[in-house]
Image: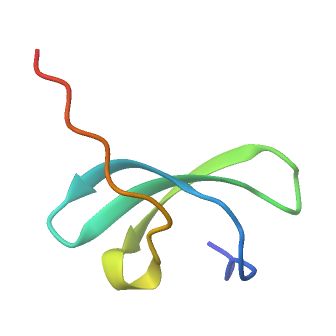
Amino acid sequence: MLKASEGEVVAIVKAQGRWRLVVFRDPLSNQLARAWVYQTALEPLAQALPEESE
């Protein structure tokens, strides 16, 4: 994964321990991509949504 520019928006899809699965727009291909990143590499902009119960 490339280093994201400051202010780039990512969506956290899943959390597993200290890792987060994020979705972002790849600047090279202009397509959506997914990657696992360490939680401290992300700065939250909003409160987490409650998990949906099945």
Residue 46, above or below 14: below
Q: Residue at x 48, y 55 (%)?
A: 22
Across and down, in percent, residue 44 comes to: 44, 69
The quarter holding residue 27 reads bottom right
Across and down, in percent, residue 16 comes to: 19, 58
Q: Residue at x 69, y 77 (%)?
A: 4
Task: Describe residue 36's horizontal placement relative to residue 51 as left or right.
Answer: right
The quarter holding residue 40 reads bottom left
Q: Residue furthest top?
A: 54
The quarter holding residue 2 reads bottom right
Q: Quadrant of the C terminus?
A: top left
Viewer-proximal residue, 43 or 34? 43
Task: Describe residue 29's horizontal placement relative to residue 26 as left or right.
Answer: right
Q: Residue at x 64, y 49 (%)?
A: 33
Task: Describe residue 46's horizontal placement relative to residue 48 as left or right.
Answer: right
Q: Residue at x 79, y 44 (%)?
A: 31
Across and down, in percent, residue 15 comes to: 25, 55
